[in-house]
Image (cartoon, coloured by chain):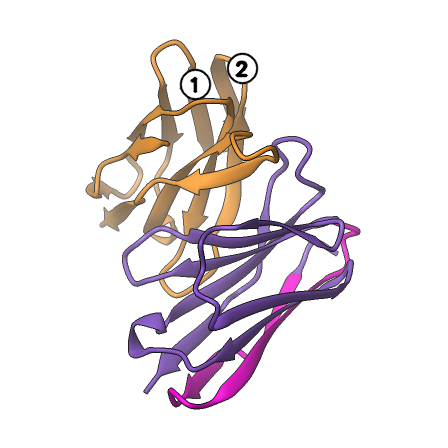
Amino acid sequence: GQNIDQPTEMTATEGAIVQINCTYQTSGFNGLFWYQQHAGEAPTFLSYNVLDGLEEKGRFSSFLSRSKGYSYLLLKELQMKDSASYLCAVSDSGAGSYQLTFGKGTKLSVIP
Amino acid sequence: DTEVTQTPKHLVMGMTNKKSLKCEQHMGHRAMYWYKQKAKKPPELMFVYSYEKLSINESVPSRFSPECPNSSLLNLHLHALQPEDSALYLCASSQDTSSSYEQYFGPGTRLTVT
């Protein structure tokens, strides 16, 4: 089975930096995805890490440590539109094909 | 075109009704997925189709019946649902299931069972 843990809610100020952590325990690990989901909308892809280290994409960066079962999503220069849920999802091949298991999501509120 | 479309956007049905949800993608993806998402919860995987064959059924009740008529289309047939089945139903697609490919999600169908 899998266990994915991330904080339920976070609040940050516009223009600031926020880090959303995700820890996981899984067998057959094949990468970790971060998705953004605005209320009532579909999840949209933000980043993918399969090797240790930092992946940077504009204002968003994602880090992975496989030995620690740990990832974080870093959002810089926060904007009001970044208020959303951020889902950590682990890819594994335990069932013979690759599939995603999502964490419960972190609801980020950006305040002026 | 990186779009996954779903119809209808909203659906209200009684417990004795039969209805279908539809999903379409034209990205040439060979894997398609159905997820169920309750409010303030993460998406839960229901079914996976790989090359038009059902590869994963996550112990979903038989009142949900998936169908993949061709590589671009995915349906979810609903019959005799319960009020607790009310949720957002998300369709997604990816290149295939042989590796960790990004999944593209459709906008979802908001289902209410009365």
Percent x, y for residue B1?
75, 56
The answer to whether any part of residue A97 appears in the image is yes
| Secondary structure at numbered mark 2 | loop
- Which amino acid does the dot numbered 1 rest on? Leu
Residue labelled with disc 2: A51
**Does the rendering let one see residue A79?**
no
Residue A96 percent coordinates (x, y): 60, 32
Q: Residue at x 59, y 45 (%)?
A: B103
Q: Is residue B6 part of the magenta span, yes or no?
A: yes
Question: Looking at the figure, which quarter contains the N terminus of chain A?
Answer: top left
- Colour applied to chain B: purple
Badge 1 sits on which subunit?
A
Q: Disc number at residue A64? A: 1
Colour chain A appears in? orange
Q: Amino acid at mark 2?
A: Leu
| Closest to the observer, A109 or B8 | B8
Q: Which residues are magenta?
A: B4-29
**Residue B26 occupies quadrant:** bottom right
In the image shown, does B105 or A37 lie closer to the viewer?
Answer: B105
Percent position of residue B40, x then y? 27, 57
